[in-house]
Image: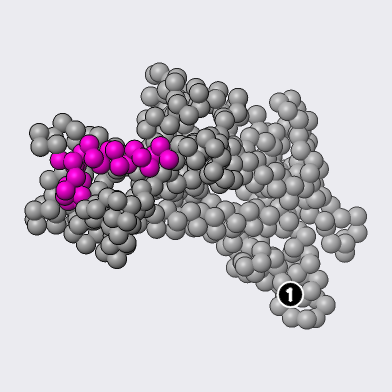
Amino acid sequence: MPPNFYNQGDQAIYSAGDFFIPQERFRAAPYTVNKPNNPDEVPAGIPTVYQSQGGGGGGYTGGISDLTGNFFQTTGDRQNRLTELNRSLTTFPSFPGAKTPGGLNAQQMYNIASEDLNDPFNRSAMSTTFPTRTAKEVMDYADDAIQDYRMQYATGELGPSFIEAEKPTLNRRINDFVYDKLGFTRPQSADQIIADGYTGQSNMPGILGMMLGKVDKYGSLPRGDQAFIARNMGYTGPTVFGANDSGLSKDVFGMNTRSGFGNYAEAVGEQVDKLGESLSATGAIGSKDAYQGASFNEATGMFEADDDDEASIAAANKANQMTKMVRAKYNFYQKQVAQRDADRAAAQAKVEAQERAKAARDNAGTQRRSDGSGGGNLTRSRDQGGLGLSASQAQSVSAANAAAGMGGWGLADGGRVPYMNGGLADMLEIYD
C-alpha cells in the first residue's frame, strides 16, 4: 500500500511499482507512470533514469548501469589523484649507495664517526663494532669508499641501474606549494588512511574550518569506515532523481557519502538489510500475488523461478522487470557493503600490526635497560634494525675488511651493528 500522506498521483506511481520516485512536490518535472498497453504484457520497469527539465546542469538519460559506472569511475579517479599527490618523488640515488669492501654502508659509517669527533678519547662511535679504531680512522676508511663511488658515477660505471631524481610536474609543484607552504591539510587516499590512520582536518581556513571540524564526526569514526567513506567521495554528478545541485558528494541514489551527522559505512548496510527484507518472500515487494512462484536470491540480486513450470518462470521474469530500480539499488549497496567490509578488515589488520610492533619496541627497550645494554642510540642488535647482519654475515664482513687492509674492523657481539642514519654527504656537488 502507498503511504497515506501521498496525493492521488503519487499513490498511482507507487502502486505501479515505482517505489523510489520522489513525491510530486519534490519533482522538477512531471513523471509518467509506466503502464503496459496490454493487460497481459509484462511492464518494462524503469529503463532510464529520470531526466530533470530544470536548471543546474540538466538531467541524465542513461541507464542505472551507466550511472553507477560513472560513480565508480569518478571516485576511482579521485583515489588515483590522491595517491599521486601523496607519493614521494624518486630522489637520487635510486640504488644502494657506496659500500665498504666488507659490504657496510659507507655513508652511514661516515655519519656516525663524524658525530663522535668531539669524544674526549677520540674513540669511534662504533666502538663496540670497531674497538681499535678512532673516529677519524673510521671516517677516512668510509670516505675512501664514497670517493670511489663518486668516480664510478662520474665515469658511468654504475651502469643502467642509475635513475636520476624525478622532476615534479607543474601540477605537483603547485600542489606541494599549496599544501606545504600555505598550511592546507593534504588529503589522504583510502589506502593511505588504512596504512597511516586519518591525519587530516577540515581544509577550510579560519573560523569556518574550526566550525566544520567540530560538526563533522568523520574524524571520530573507526579507521576502516573513514577509508571506505574517503573511497566514495568526489562524485557530484546526477543521481536517479536528476541533477545534483547541492555540490555535495552523493552516491547515485542521492545519499551523502560524507555527513556531519551520519556514517555512510553504516548506512549502506542498513540499505541492504531494508531492501533485502522488502524483496524477500515475506516483504512488501516479494510477497505480491503476481510474484508467487518466484523467490528473490540475495546472492544474485535476482528473482528466480521456484519451479521449471511456465507460471513460475513468468512470475520470475515479471518480478525482475517490475523491480529493476529496487534491485539496482540493492545490488549497488550490496557491492558497497563488500568494499566496506574489505576496508574494515584491512584497517583492523594494520592497527593490530602497529600495536604489535609498538609492544615489541617497548619490550625491547625494557630489556635493554634491564640488562645494561642501553645507553645510547648508536648501536642496535640485529632484531632492532641497523644493518641486520647475522653472526655468520658479520664474520664475512670482518674477513672482507681485513682482506682490504683494515685489520681489526670486525663486528663484535655476534652481529651487533651500529645504528645509522643514511643519506649521501656532499653528493650534490657532483651535479656541478
Q: Is residue 430 magenta?
A: no
Q: Is residue 147 magenta?
A: yes
Q: Nearer the viewer, residue 410 or 34?
A: 410
Q: Secondary structure at mark 1?
A: strand
Residue that numbered label 1 is attached to: 305
Above/below status of 337 relative to 68: below
The answer to whether residue 256 is visible is: no
284 sits left or right of 138 in the view: right
The answer to whether residue 63 is visible is: yes
Above/below status of 298 relative to 162: below
Above/below status of 208 relative to 346: above
Q: Residue at x 76, y 41 (%)?
A: 50
367 sits left or right of 394 in the view: left
Q: Residue at x 79, y 54 (%)?
A: 45
Magenta stretch?
123-148
At which x and y percent is residue 98?
A: 41, 44
At which x and y percent is residue 113?
A: 24, 38
Q: Residue at x 78, y 81 (%)?
A: 308
Which amino acid lies under the numbered mark 1 shown in the image of this protein? Ala
At which x and y percent is residue 168?
A: 57, 29
